[in-house]
Amino acid sequence: MDFEERLAALAAKVKNQRAAIQTEEATKNAFIMPFISTILGYDVFNPLEVVPEFTADVGVKRGEKIDYAIMRNGEVQILIECKSSTAALSLEHASQLFRYFAVTNARIAVLTNGAVYNFYTDLDAPNRMDEKPFLVLDLADIDETLIPELSKLTKEVFDLDSVINAAEELKYVGALKREIAAQFREPSAEWIKFFTGLVYDGSFTQKVREQFSALVPKAARQYLNEQVNDRLKTALGASAVAATSAEPTESITSHPVVQGDLDRDTEIDTTPEELEGYQIIKAIACADVKPQRVTHRDAKSYFAVLLDDNNRRPIARLWFNGKKQKYLGIFDEAKNETKLPIDSLDDIYEHADLIRSTVRSYG
């Protein structure tokens, strides 16, 4: 497996086992040691590469231990402090990292609970660990733009200088992305006032505030959906042009943009129209979740769109197998399905809010 495949495999393991991992030691064994070994490529059983329970006396603090120190050429390069997978990460958990960072040669410190990895360096002051991470790797929601930077810390291509040089941009771009995402989910009063001022010339009264508190997030979601849909339509259009110039093949190959998503059950006829409907629902759901979390399973009577490939997390169903009327199946919080008649695939967009509401209900 290549680097991204190993990362995806570990993410799947964390997803499947996290609920059963209740202690810090279990978290180390199940998640963090595999991360050090299979992702970063260091031998966890070789003390010349990985030192568990690393000790470096710090001032009046004697005998304190850091969970792991990754070594290169006899020098500490990366410090790792571990917490239970059930614990949320915060600066209070990083006190030992702060102290050890100042008395070792390490330029990278990692605080992790096995599912989220916060990477720190010393951008703000030399030899003093920053209070904010420059890279946050969440295995439940992997930001693909961070993968090349993470790979630079592997044993095979260890490139500390390149990581440090990119750290400041990574730190602020990552923080901005997280802040923008938070504003999309729940816009602050300042965010609402700022955008209202750009389009509304009157006084920002309480009534106006209440009106735009609903309009700003709605406009933001619609804009994001339109950007995703435009890219999807471009991809589908390009694939159609490519298909017309190719040798005749099975109908499935005329839709390479969704080929990887096709159901392999040969007894079920997955139609191009169902796949196009799936892509529309996927684009709508991407306002709240990563695209790879939206999957499908085709059945003889309907085409199901699921979250995390889990049939207990249905997003919608396409009832396209009838000869006349087509239906879009929508689910409420109790997972009761309501069939809504549609005349064309574009009608799915009219129910975008219901689809997103269902996605958000799964957390």
Image (cartoon, rainbow, N blue to C red):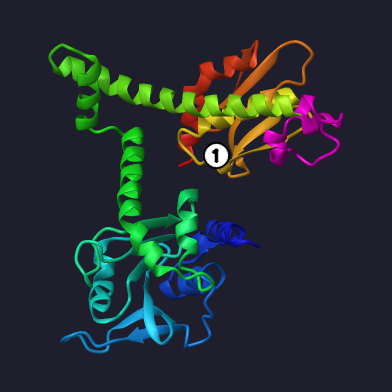
The residue located at (70%, 41%) in the rendering is 260
In the image, taking residue 22 as reference, residue 189 lies left or right, namely left
In the image, taking residue 80 as reference, residue 357 lies left or right, namely right
Instruction: Quadrant for residue 237, please give it.
Output: top right
Query: Which quadrant holds the N terminus?
Result: bottom right
Query: Which quadrant holds the C terminus?
Result: top left
Q: Position of residue 89 (x, y in %)?
A: 33, 61
Instruction: Quadrant for residue 328, please give it.
Output: top right
Q: In this orientation, does residue 270 appear?
A: no
The residue located at (44%, 81%) in the rendering is 72
Magenta range is: 243-269
- Work out whether residue 282 or residue 268 is closer to the camera in this orientation and state it: 282
Against 39, is 218 above or below? above
- Work out whether residue 79 or residue 107 is closer to the camera in this orientation and state it: 107
The residue located at (41%, 26%) in the rendering is 221
Q: Position of residue 278 (x, y in %)?
A: 64, 29
Against 322, is 66 above or below? below
| Residue 235 falls within the magenta-colored stretch | no
| Residue 248 falls within the magenta-colored stretch | yes
Residue at disc 1, secondary structure: helix
Question: How dense is the environment of label 1, judged by Cα within 10 Å: few (below 14), some, or many (20 and up)?
Answer: some
Q: Position of residue 240 (x, y in %)?
A: 72, 25
Against 57, is 170 above or below? above
Against 72, is 92 above or below? above
- Work out whether residue 87 or residue 273 is closer to the camera in this orientation and state it: 273
Q: Position of residue 262 (x, y in %)?
A: 73, 38
Residue labelled with disc 1: 291
Q: Amino acid at mark 1?
A: Pro
